[in-house]
Amino acid sequence: MEDKKINSDTSRAPKSVKPHTIKIEDTDGIGGKVKVTIDGVDVRVPFGTTILDAAKMINVHIPTLCHHEDLCVAGVCRVCVVDVEGQRTLQASCAYPITQPIVVHTTSPKVRRARRNIIDLLLSKHYGECYSCVRNNNCELQTLAKEYGVDKYRFGHITERRHEVDNSSYALRRDMDKCVLCRRCVRTCIDLQEVGVLGAIGRGDETVIGTFMDKPLADVICINCGQCINRCPTGALQANDPSDEIWNAIDDPKKHVVIQTAPSPRAGIGEEFGLEPGVPLTFEMNTALRRCGFDKVFDTNFTADLTIIEEGTELILRLYNALVKKDPQIALPQFTSCSPGWVKYIEHFYPEYLAHVSSSKSPQQMFGAVIKTYYAQINNIDPADIVTVALMPCSAKKFECNRPEMSDSGYKDVDYGLTTRELAQMIREAGIDLPRIPKSDFDDPFGSATGSGVIFGATGGVMEAALRTVFELVTGQIADPDALAGQVSEIRGFDGIKYKELTLPEKLGPVPDILRMNKDVPFDSWDWLSGATLKLAVAHGTANAKKVLDDIIAGGKFSECHFIEFMACPGGCLGGGGQPIPTTPEIRKARAKAIYSEDQAYEIRKSHDNPAVVELYVKFLTEGPNGHLAHKLLHTHYTPRGKYIA
Amino acid sequence: MSERKGYILFIDVEPNTGLKKALTKKRTEVIADIRNSGLKGRGGAGFPTGVKWNLAASASSDTKYVVCNADEGEPGTFKDRVILSEYTDDLLEGITIAGYAIGAETGIIYLRGEYEYLKKQIVDTIDKRRSEGWLGKNVGGKEVFNFDIEIRMGSGAYVCGEETALIESLEGQRGEPRNRPPFPVNTGFMGCPTIVNNVETLVTASRIIAKGVDWFTKYGIDKSTGTKVYSISGDCEKPGVYEFNIGITIAELLKEVGGGNAKAVVMGGASGRVVPAKDFAKTVAYVDAPTGGSVIVLGQERDMLDVAENFLEFFVEESCGQCTPCREGNPLLLDGVKRLKNGTCSMEYLQELMSLAETMQLASKCGLGQSSPNAFLSIIEHFETEIFGRVPVM
Amino acid sequence: MLMTERQTQADTIEALAKKFGKDRTGLMPILQEIQAKYKHISDFAMQEIARELDIHPVEVYSVISFYAFLRSKQTGKFVIRLCRTLSCEMAGKKRVARQLENELGVAFGETTSDGRFTLEYANCLGLCDQGPAMLVNDVAFTEVTPEKVHEIIQECKRTFSVYAQEVQKHV
């Protein structure tokens, strides 16, 4: 039924706390479509369509603020009010479902006056100046002010701070003085992500968005996913920006500043420079980074490939010990560990399941550890002089690199996590017109990467990359990535939870050399996997992760899985909290397209074929995957944090 | 029983007369009676009760609820306190009739936290009725009519008198009004069809069933049938709760309560209107339709800006804070009143504020925001001479 | 908070959740009972309630912060709420307010240093025909005069250990 979505959307209350559905009954038996007249234009819309959506169908622009495509309807900002004939008051078009023929005026004098007054009200309490704001030129309030020709503060303008900026978190910065109380962040945190850190506190004109007992963000159970930042219409939420420190390091001649770049920022950064979503600028970005002054530009895909080898080996060992050795201590399914938002989520919400999380570090942290050891060694650089920067689509990466355990190189493995948005700012500051500069390649020795690394950026990507490698290493047959993609098409795309069973052939190949490097691998043939069926799942967005974990606890089908990929952010890294603003389902789709097309452009598309990875094992990690040194540098442990807030 | 003088509500009726009669009728006949009586909601919004019941009755759902709105919070309103304490049994009877009419099995009384001291009596009366068979399984011996009533307390939030905010509160949420549609008759408590009726409405409904539609429609005027219970306070000799025929003029009302020398009256509380003496010949129904029944009498020496200031302070605190016009608008109107008091509000700025007040009326999410500027606007309209060019009090 | 106190609170909350249903509709009555018992809802209690009802602690805090009668910070044994709405204002609320401040030595919104009294304003108590009105905990006092304020406070102090419900008999 068409009205299913709107039914659950028209309530103010978060969906997560509503066990029941909100329904609008078609009591008049109108059924299918309803006629609506908007500014004199007739259009027939499905029963229950909102006025806002109906207006979009005929290209009538209605301004919005609290509305966001990813979130349930709030109807609180009142910017989108319209005049519905026969109604005494104006109606919020985002929340008004059309259930009978109505006549709507979207720009009557009454409406324009009301919108102008509402915008002036919002501005009266919005502290600060646009030119000193991170969201200057990308702020929905600023856009509204421009749209409605605000030329003075009719209801005054606050000039004193009322709130302290919460700077406690490594990842996020919260400035309530810029908040317009649209509550998108609350709906993101509670409904979309089901983390539940932010809520509306107080009432009346004292209402603020706050945390449990107004504690600093660092002291509550924030997972740093940054999805709230992507949905904030103003500068009230932003990532903690390290670019000043990075510039300082670049300017310091003693420092050797190395940057690794993850796949998703390439797919998104063009949006910061006015391009349509979905135009990758990988190689332009390399040139820009060098012009900014980075000494080396590496590809995080290299350690994504390394992750596949380490995590894949770990999975195979778990499977062997559980299935063949019947060791009851072995935790299956194995969970991926590359999303730091997800890792912190499980540390808080399901600490008893931490044994399931792969001990492999994320690609970012593997890279940092390799650079400050192997890279420093072969280039004869004092690791103390190396500054490693990680360009990530992610705000949680800022927290991850500051975890105390992330210093296995003897130094802080990754010094700074930089988001796509922050790099775009640095590039602009350096006077570089990114879309129009020459392309250049990554630096060696970690410049070679595979398509497997690239697809890490999309939900299902880690799973698919792992399958490419596992399939080939286990069967001994050359796997065609596109054919494989067709075979496991279920794990691509944006369904919240994806499930796939994959049966291995009876006849399997020899155990490959790379695994044999590790003398502790306890088997010398794949016989035990012959004809086995692998059960795999993928979940993105922590709300979906919660569903999968609850199913595991209840002993459902996911408890029988062998391997599950979890990503904290909807859409995976390409929808990360450090990506360009705004984000919508369409934008995420476009970025995914960019990522998959880039994968196809690679000559090498399987992690184990990456020559630099093979070389690293041959020359440095000589005990092979999951060997002693690999364990020291490339693996980590987790902290059961729990939910209790002291 | 009460010593109060009345016509419909404040009269003695043999307990359960209405309920017994209702149980002999079909559900649709009960609703038809209420509809034909012309009864409108007595809480303030004035929605036809029979229509509301019929919508809930015809909504398809196995579970439905009757909610009695006993969250009377409008400044100057206290008639429900009196009805709750003096006509408890009649109220429970009315809730039960409503439950029968719409096909509900559960009634919930949402009692404001300020009336905690009434809770015990209500609970005791519920228990008594249950032991007498007027609540519980097969109510009044009627097969397959099971109905019980529970009581839930508010915790100090005026906005919870708004029906969707009240439902939010019942669901354990902040009392923030919902978007409408959908309306509670379709999607109310726990997503089920729910009628939310005021205390007075429910007692009146039980009277209508007990004594008949014709008896009821003898009272009132035109389309406003019946009587209304008023809460009268302020500068008068006999403040209290009165039942008057709908159609009484303000002057007549003031005479009854000894408030003849009033300068103005506030009709409908903080969200109502201030009526100057020149309009006292008008009927209460005319200036205050629909009405919650609050009348605050203002004597000659009262400063109208004090009234506006008091009400706006009230709204600044009691706004739920979710929608922009109400949350940000009320503090600005309050500031405007302070400026007027200090003689520092220009005509230009006052006009901006009046435009803002109009926006609040039109664009706020719920009735609270929509009616919060009413007193401000009516004071500006009627008491110009008191407002401009004031010398601030040092 | 001592571990044993915590345990008692946790047990109380568990029992209340059982009584009112382990879903969110039980939230308000649970909060009201905890508030009545402990004079506030501690951050520990909030988290226990959140756990029992399977909601987020910030949602519990959000709800508490919305309702004037629910408190996340300790209040006095006696919470005095003086009505400040128009009818009571016109009936002489100002002088009663001043006398309350004088008697208690604190301003509105504050708690006495001995933790006995919290003084605050309330919006319309529905006793407009008998103003000025105030609530001492759940007990209503009407037509309060400055002289009566002194008596009420004295009675509260005398009956300190048995709560204000007892006070009504005397005043």
Image (cartoon, grey):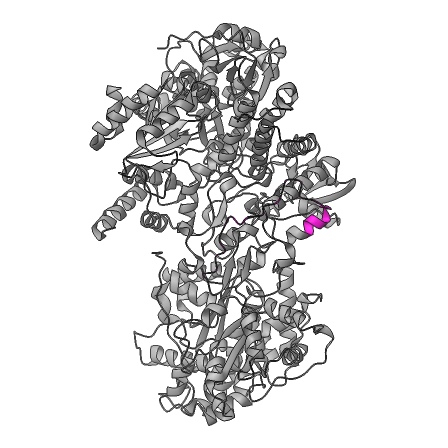
**Where B175 falls versus C128 (above or below)?**
below
Which of the pair B389/A160 is nearer the observer?
Answer: B389
Q: Is residue A298 above or below residue A90?
A: below
Q: Residue most toward the right?
A: A40
Residue A406 to residue A642: above or below: below
Which image quadrant is residue A612 in? bottom right
Q: Residue A602 falls in which quadrant of the image? A: bottom right
Residue at 35 percent across and 87 percent down: it is A522
Q: Is residue B46 left or right of residue C35?
A: right
| Horizontal side, residue B262 vs residue C127: left or right | right
Q: Position of residue A343 (x, y in %)?
A: 43, 67
Q: Is residue A157 magenta?
A: yes
Q: Does residue A99 appear to the left or right of B192 in the view shown?
A: right
Is residue A32 something that shows in the picture? no
Magenta residues (range): A143-168
Magenta segment's dominant SS is loop
Pinpoint residue A590: horizontal percent, then vertical percent.
Answer: 66, 66
Rendering coords of residue B383 (x, y %): 63, 19
Give how far across and how far down residue B253 sits, in percent: 53, 8
The quarter of the image holding the C terminus of chain A is: bottom left
